[in-house]
Image (cartoon, grey):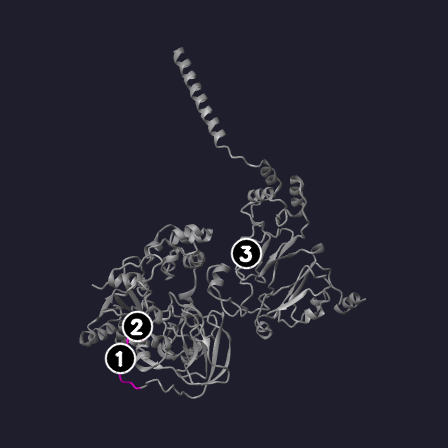
């Protein structure tokens, strides 16, 4: 009886020892040498794995940061400048501040201004709908309203408004990861600089049709009248194929174009409520 | 026993309520809107300018590129504009707009009713003539016929298979021409046989068209012994070229292959009629038979209609938009395209204007897949639609390719049989497009 117990303990211990040795030597032989900094950088990152940086996930981005000589061109939109500074500090390099961005919906044709010309009864997906036809309104460029952007958002930041049929961005939650930009088959959503205190001005339309056609399809379409371009003192507005575009790097937020736009296609966000238009213009001139 | 294809297929109610309506000429409209993109491939290049006078049958646009086709004016009058206009899906396409003045035909066109039986031209002359006259496949895809009739080097056609199946419910345009112009179709078939250098042709007709089968068989037994009429069991999608080859010859077209890989060329009977008119009568393709039908309509009609007639005027001709019509479809109910713009004009391959009621078109709410495998049974290509649907929604492109999504013929059989109303076709079509795009972008070995 005792011998059996001793023999069992001895044989199992021996087996354990042998296997441990095999494991040890195998681990030595096939050891993967990985920069330990990658793990550390990964813990600094937010861990959302959204892919907004252009890498497959946070770990891939951390690897990219460690391997790169400088952090130029590498940016984690979720963590923003704070995270990038921490990463740079840890890696002993410098990083330039990048202006925070936000997703902007460049279509404001709601149910009233952009009447429906057909009824879509298919699968609820913008991609499928765009594959079938130009849309259920006369505007070929406008939002299809099936909510692919809402589904694509990992941060719950973009929501379809059932009243207008258009998506709305919650700028507190939006990380500018760009998932909705890729999901939109009509290329309506753009990442733009958030601007000081969130103030920004943009053309909320991407209709490239001639003025008459665009206006007929949607009351708030950009008709390419060039009025905004003429009024802009900073050369920030360009017009190509009947559509105005405001360069957010040049725009000084004077809001003259917003006043000038005959179709209200230019939007201002986060500005204080305007006193009657004339007075503001006068104040700015002084 | 009638033949049919071996895998899958469905049996929708055929609803051919317009069978009895003889073909009548549609009045020539006041303005014709002729699209420059009526065929698969590159849009044609207009050769007329604003203000030019054109005659019916005159060349107004030249083929632009290898896969493209000539376009001829369907009316006579003055070109009033060449501009971008929405097609039936709302996408802008270049159109030549002709203001109609009278109906003066090009002198070259032989308008006599006699049937010209003797084929005088050589194969290469026939193909050149077909290309000149802008003939495209009238089975739906509108592939330029002259390219189909010139097989790539190294491949040889053995048989010509004619598609008279007309498996789509509601459509009767092919049936009516088989009944009213059977001999022209057979001569057209022979012209294409000469062009291809084949000795034998088959015409597949579904057995829900006994009169057409009888009329064609009688003619064949008399003077067209090299053409065989094959009666086919009624089953959708028999008119798909791969299905038709399987049904008639028992040959399988390989994955991503073309019918010519099995030594077969498939053409539609409507195309045969157009080929006959082009080669024997010098008449370019500018009109075709269009069925205007629907359960909500009091009368069903088959029109011989000029290309460039708006859907609006077709509706007007049959008494306006019926009250209970919910959806307009250009083509059949299975593979046709919804007409989103009523002001859009018909093209060469327009075969029907179908008006569906709410009951027929309304989608029911989507349920969960219960793995009943009805879609697998129905798929004529032997694919697994339920799996492809899941893979598409997950965006797994590699797995989609491994499961042959690229072989889908978009017939909609899976969607038709699904008891859970899952939009299988919608998701599969989308992922098929992205898979094909990736496959084409790969360097060729």
Query: Where does the image place residue B162, in percent across and percent down from the top left?
Result: 28, 69
Query: Where does the image place residue B37, in percent across and percent down from the top left?
Result: 44, 72
Between the C-alphas of marks 1 and 2, the distance is 21 Å
Residue that appears at 22% across and 64% down? B2
Residue that appears at 38% across and 86% down? B105
- In the picture, measured across the screen, residue B30 lies left or right of residue A193, that is left
Quarter holding the C terminus of chain A is: bottom right
The quadrant in which residue B159 appears is bottom left
Name the residue carrying label 1.
B120
Q: Earlier in the sequence, mark 1 or mark 2?
A: 1
Q: Is residue B118 magenta?
A: yes
Between the C-alphas of marks 3 and 1, the distance is 58 Å
Specify the segment rendered in magenta.
B112-124
Task: Tell me the element at label 1.
Answer: loop
Choose mark 1 or mark 2, whichever is in front. 1
Q: Are marks 3 and 2 on the same chain?
A: no
Q: Is residue B415 magenta?
A: no
Task: Tell me the element at label 3.
Answer: helix
What numbered label is drawn on residue B269?
2
Where is B442 relative to B210, above or below?
above
The quadrant in which residue B242 appears is bottom left
Q: Residue furthest left?
A: B222
Query: Where does the image place residue A27, in percent across and percent down from the top left?
Result: 49, 30
């Amino acid at each position: 009886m005792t011998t059996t117990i001793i023999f069992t303990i001895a044989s199992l211990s021996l087996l354990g020892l042998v296997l441990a040795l095999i494991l040890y030597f195998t681990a030595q032989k096939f050891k993967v040498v990985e920069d330990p900094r990658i793990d550390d950088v990964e813990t600094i990152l937010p861990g959302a794995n959204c892919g907004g940086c252009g890498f497959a996930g946070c770990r891939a981005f951390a690897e990219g940061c460690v391997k790169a000589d400088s952090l130029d061109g590498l940016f984690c939109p979720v963590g923003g400048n704070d995270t990038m500074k921490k990463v740079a500090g840890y890696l002993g390099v410098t990083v330039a501040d990048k202006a925070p961005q936000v997703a902007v919906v460049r279509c404001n044709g709601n149910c009233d201004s952009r009447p429906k010309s057909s009824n879509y009864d298919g699968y609820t997906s913008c991609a499928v709908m765009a594959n079938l036809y130009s849309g259920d309104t006369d505007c070929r460029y406008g939002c299809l309203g099936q909510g692919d952007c809402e589904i694509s958002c990992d941060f719950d930041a973009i929501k379809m408004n059932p009243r207008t049929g258009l998506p709305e961005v919650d700028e507190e939650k939006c990380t500018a990861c760009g998932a909705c930009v890729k999901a939109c088959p009509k290329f309506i959503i753009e990442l733009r600089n958030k601007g000081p205190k969130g103030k920004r001005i943009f053309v909320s339309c991407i209709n490239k049709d001639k003025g008459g056609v665009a206006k007929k399809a949607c009351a708030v379409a950009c008709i390419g009248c060039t009025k905004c371009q003429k009024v802009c003192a900073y050369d920030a507005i360009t017009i190509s194929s009947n559509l105005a575009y405001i360069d957010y790097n040049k725009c000084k937020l004077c809001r003259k174009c917003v006043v000038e736009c005959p179709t209200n296609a230019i939007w201002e966000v986060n500005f204080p409520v305007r006193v009657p238009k004339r007075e503001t213009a006068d104040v700015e001139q002084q | 026993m009638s033949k049919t294809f071996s895998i899958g297929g469905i049996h929708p109610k055929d609803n051919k309520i317009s069978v009895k309506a003889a073909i009548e000429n549609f009045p020539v409209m006041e303005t014709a809107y002729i699209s420059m993109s009526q065929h698969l491939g590159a849009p044609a290049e207009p050769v007329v300018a604003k203000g030019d006078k054109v005659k019916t049958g005159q060349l107004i646009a030249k083929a632009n590129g290898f896969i493209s086709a000539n376009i001829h004016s369907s009316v006579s009058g003055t070109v009033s504009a060449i501009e971008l206009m929405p097609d039936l899906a709302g996408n802008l396409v270049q159109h030549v707009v002709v203001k109609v003045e009278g109906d003066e035909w090009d002198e070259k066109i032989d308008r006599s009713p006699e049937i010209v039986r003797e084929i005088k031209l050589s194969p290469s002359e026939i193909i050149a003539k077909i290309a000149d006259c802008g003939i495209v496949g009238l089975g739906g895809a509108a592939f330029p016929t002259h390219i189909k009739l010139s097989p790539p080097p190294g491949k040889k056609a053995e048989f010509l298979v004619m598609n008279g199946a007309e498996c789509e419910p509601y459509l009767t345009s092919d049936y009516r021409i088989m009944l009213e112009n059977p001999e022209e179709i057979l001569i057209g078939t022979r012209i294409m046989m000469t062009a291809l250098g084949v000795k034998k042709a088959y015409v597949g007709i579904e057995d829900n068209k006994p009169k057409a089968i009888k009329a064609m068989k009688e003619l064949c037994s008399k003077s067209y012994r090299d053409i065989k009429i094959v009666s086919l069991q009624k089953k959708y999608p028999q008119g798909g070229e791969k299905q038709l080859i399987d049904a008639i010859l028992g040959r399988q077209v390989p994955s991503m292959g073309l019918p010519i890989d099995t030594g077969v060329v498939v053409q539609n009977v409507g195309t045969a009629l157009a080929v006959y008119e082009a080669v024997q009568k010098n008449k370019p393709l500018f009109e075709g038979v269009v069925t205007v039908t629907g359960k909500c309509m009091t009368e069903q009609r088959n029109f011989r209609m000029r290309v460039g007639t708006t859907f609006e005027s077709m509706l007007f001709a049959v008494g306006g938009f019926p009250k209970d019509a919910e959806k307009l479809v250009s083509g059949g109910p299975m593979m046709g395209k919804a007409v989103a713009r009523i002001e859009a004009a018909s093209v060469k391959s327009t075969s029907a204007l179908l008006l569906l009621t709410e009951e027929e078109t309304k989608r029911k709410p989507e349920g969960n897949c219960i793995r009943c495998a009805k879609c697998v049974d129905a798929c004529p290509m032997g694919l697994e639609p339920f799996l492809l649907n899941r893979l598409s929604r997950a965006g797994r492109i590699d797995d989609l390719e491994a499961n042959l999504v690229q072989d889908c013929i978009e017939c909609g059989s899976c969607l038709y049989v699904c008891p859970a109303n899952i939009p299988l076709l919608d998701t599969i079509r989308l992922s098929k497009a992205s898979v094909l795009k990736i496959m084409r972008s790969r360097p060729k070995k």
